[in-house]
Every structure is written in C-alpha cells, then in structure tokens.
Image: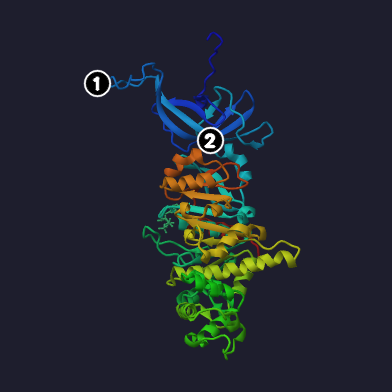
Amino acid sequence: MTDLHPIDNDDSAKYRLIGESVLSYQFIVPHDARIYLGDLLKIADETKGLTFYAKVSEICHACNFADPRWDTRAYAGRFYVMGEDVFLGVKAAPLGYLDEGGKFRKPNTLPSKFSRVVADPDAADFAFLRKEMGEIEVGLLKNGLGVVEGVPVALHAKVMAQHMGVFATTGMGKSNFMKVFSASCMKAREFGMLIVDPHGEYATGGRSSTGDPTKGLLHYTAGRDGLAVFTIDRKKLEKYHLNHLWLEYDDIRASDLNILFDHSGPQHDVLELLGDVRGSDLIAFFEETDFANFDAGTYEGRFKWIAEQLRTSHPGPLNVLKRHFEILTRSNAPFFRKEGSSIPEIVRALDENKVVLIDIPTMGERSELFVLSVITRQIMGRHREWGVDKEERPPQVLIAIEEAQRVLGTGGRQTQIFREAAMEGRKFGVGLCVVTQQPKNIDPRVLAQLNTFVVMGLGDRGDRDIIASSAKQDLSQMDTEIQTLDTGEAVISTLKIPFPVSTKIHAFDGYIGTLNREARRPIDDGLKRGFF
Ligand SMILES: Nc1ncnc2c1ncn2[C@@H]1O[C@H](COP(=O)(O)OP(=O)(O)OP(=O)(O)O)[C@@H](O)[C@H]1O
C-alpha cells in the first residue's frame, strides 16, 4: 500500500477505470450520478497514449462494506444517509481504441488502471468515426438518452449488394427508417433501389401506425431526380405526373404462378415442364384449351409444342392451372395486360441509380409479391448475363422485401427467386434489403448472407438471439440496449463501420425538410451574390 500515490484530481477526471478485462471495463460513479445504458465513454490512457471508447452495458449498486447484508439489516424507516462508500458500479463494453498514429483498432488490449473515464464525449471526440461513415445517412450517433450532434450515422453504398436486414417490431419506426434510407439513396445516387409499397404510403405519405399524417418521398423535392414512381393510382398519376405501372404477359413465366397460389405436386410438375414458355403463349394456351378432353396426340390448337410437353399430364392439375391463369389475369388487370410493359423503364431508372417505387395501393399482398418476384427475376436474369457479355461491372441494385418472412422462410419453392437473389445476388451486384418483424422465421441460411443489420427494438428473446448469432459484429453485449431501444432508435452493425453503432434514426419529415433547405441554400446564396 505504501507504493500508492494519489492522482491529481480535476473535475473532468472524476471517473477512473478500475478493472476488469479486455472484454469488459469497470468503473464507479457516485450513487446519485445520472448514467444510462448505452452512454458512450472515452477512456484516455495517458500512460500508453491510447484513447479507448466504450459503451455502458450494465449499472448496479455497489459499496465498500464487507457485510454483504449491510443494506437489509436496516429496519423500516431507518435506512442510511448515503456516504462515499455507497456508489454505482458501471460496466462498459469496449468498442475499440485509437492508437498513437490515430488509427482505430479493435479492442485487443485494455486501458491502464485508473485511466480517466470521460462520460460525455462530444463530436470532436468522435471525429475519427465521421471518417468511417459512408454515403447513405440514416440518423445521428446515439449517446445514452441523447445524440452526439455532428456525428451522423451513414451506411456505405458499396456494401449494400452484400444484403441488409431491417428488424423491427411493429410500431418501432420501420416505415420511417425505410423512407429516410430511401431519401438518402435518392440523394446519393450510388445504386438503384426497388421498393414495392402495397399500402401506397411511401410515395405521397399517409398515416403512421399511430395515426399521425406523414410525408412521402415525393415531398423530398430537391431529390426528385433520384426517384421514379410507378403507380396504378389514377389520382396520383394525374396529380404528381407519375408513371403508370404495367406488366405484360411476356414478363411472366410459369413459376410466377407459384407466388400467387399454393400448388400440389402434380400442378407444380406441370409448371416446371412449362418453365421456359413465354408468358403470352402460356396464358393463351390455357385460355383456349378445354382440358376435359385434352389429349396431346390429337391436340389441334395453335400451341402444339406446349401440348407436346404435357403428354403425360392429367386433366385435373391442368384444369386447376387454367383457373389460376384466369384469376392471375383478372385480379391483376389494373397493371397486367397483353402488351406494353414498364419493366424496361424500371430497369433504366435502376441503372440510373434511382429509387424505384412501385405503388400498388389496394392490390393486396399476393399481387405485391407477384410484382416483386416478376421484376426481381428480370433483374437477376439481366445481371447474370451481364458478366458474360460485358467487361464493366453491372450497376448495383438493392431490392427491398417487406415482411420478408413470407418469402424467405425455411423451405417453400414459391420463393425460389428471392432465395436465389439472397444466395448469389451479391456476385452480380443485386442486394436484398430484408425487412421483417420476425427474424426467427427467416431461413438462417439467408440471415447468414446479410452483412448489414439494422435492429430496431426486438422484444422477443428468440428474435434477438438469432440476430446476435447472425450478425458479423458481436452484439451479445448490446442485448439489454436492444431490449430497451425506443421508437426510432436502432443498433446498426455493418461492414466498414468498426463497431455496432447505436443510432437515433432521423424523423423523415424533418430530415427531408433539412435536405430541401440545404439544396435551396446554394441557389439562395448565389442569388444574394447576384448571379445573373
Ligand atoms: N426516428 C423517428 N423519430 C421520430 N419519430 C419516429 C421515428 N420513427 C418512427 N417515429 C414515429 O413512431 C411512429 C411509428 O413509426 P412507423 O409508422 O415508422 O412504425 P412501423 O414500425 O413502420 O409500424 P408498422 O409496423 O405498424 O407499420 C410514427 O408516429 C412515427 O412518426
């Protein structure tokens, strides 16, 4: 004990690191200190010249008394006045450190004993993190209850082809996140993004899950060039001068029927046999043929080569499929017709790195998935061929799938195209943005392909465990924080940003207001200076 010398104290150095290991730091604060889970810390190791960063992961009551029951021996009405021997013990999860050269490194060593703990670091302390951020801004770095103003959190466009997952229980701000993300994509124009919106809210706004009116992507007027909306809503078509969405019969293949209907084995076999037949021929063949007396040998119609392939098929499954083709054309008539497709225009807009919004209000979820699967198949086909024909890399596309457990659950042949995109899309520059409330219902092989995780409050332990085990960065120490995330807050784990960042997602209406004002400012400034 005689070797111990007191440290000169100053106000900013009131907390000092006392333990514990490379994986977890410990320090104490007065019993009445306001400290919160998720608070960011800077730990200045003046001995070694390193600056460590950490995040509060646990807070508990602690004291210096040897008697473990000192606090329960008090009888009612006579508890003790708190002295210096009673305090809060704080544990913090290391994030990494800045070495002598200013390079940010993984936490592979620990700060010296009694290093100074700064509990409220500011934007200057996180200047290194700003340099690590990408182009797609989604919010501000969160620090406990507040944010670090001046430190935006922005995803890297380059890693989007390596798939992303957005996980949020209902009402936690998933729609708001998707709109903020899309607006930033419109601004950055680094890749094309496809979203199918069955509720018709993303384009023009609508009502949030709490009933409040919200704005849409069309209100981001300064970014309008980065948006292409294809809609079936006549009022919106006229009011906002949007594109009409059309798919034509030739856009589909037999397998697309799988997304609309559940098929038996024999029905599925027929669809497999007809896998390569053009959509218009398929629909005409099933429309014209009476399967009650169908015999491929005596078939006299226009589609002999199709009939030939069905030589061994029975009338039962063929009749069911005839009905399914009828329903397909009838129920999707607002956007599905014989000739004239928007897909070339959609693909062009994606090539120009725009956000392509397919707005199909009132069409229902089967139609939503049908449209998404038809367009995804065409994009995948085009990108697969690209490698063979051209030397330059294909443009990058991100395809958003909302309620993705519907099509990326375990098993289910109807979802083959999305599975293919998840498994091999990254090779061709096709990324998926998998949005779900139920990560545990997503095929683990698909989750393993995701490299960006946006986690927004998951109450279910099973869901959190599956996310923690799939993320590429360690989220296990953030479990309590993820449980306590508020609406609009997220933990984001992604490539090229060195640790999982807690983020306060921008509120969409305010964010696009700022973007619109920023875009106007250079013009206003120019006018003031007398440009013309
Ligand atoms: N980052 C945020 N900042 C401020 N308010 C937010 C934020 N995110 C969401 N909200 C508000 O929280 C409410 C719910 O958000 P939102 O509609 O995006 O949730 P959701 O998860 O998409 O819900 P649902 O799954 O029911 O569609 C809305 O009133 C929205 O304005």
Residue 250 visible in the picture: yes
Q: Amino acid at mark 1?
A: Tyr
Q: Foreground mark, 2 or 1?
A: 1
- The 10 Å Cα crowd at callout 2, few under 14, some 14 to 19, many 20 or more, is some
Q: Secondary structure at mark 2?
A: loop
- Residue at the disc numbered 2: 121
Q: Residue furthest bottom?
A: 300
Using the rendered image of the protein, determine whether residue 525 is visible from the camera's viewpoint: no
Q: Quadrant of residue 433?
A: bottom right
Q: In front: 323, or 230?
A: 323
Q: Quadrant of ligand 1?
A: bottom left
Q: Position of residue 222 (x, y in %)?
A: 56, 63
Between 504 and 380, the one lying in front of the other is 380
Q: Quadrant of the C terminus?
A: bottom right
Q: Residue at x 64, y 25 (%)?
A: 48
Identified at 46% across, 25% down, the residue is 28
> At x 52% / y 62%, what residue is drawn?
220
Mark 2 beta carbon near ligand 1 (under 8 Å): no
Q: Quadrant of residue 331?
A: bottom left
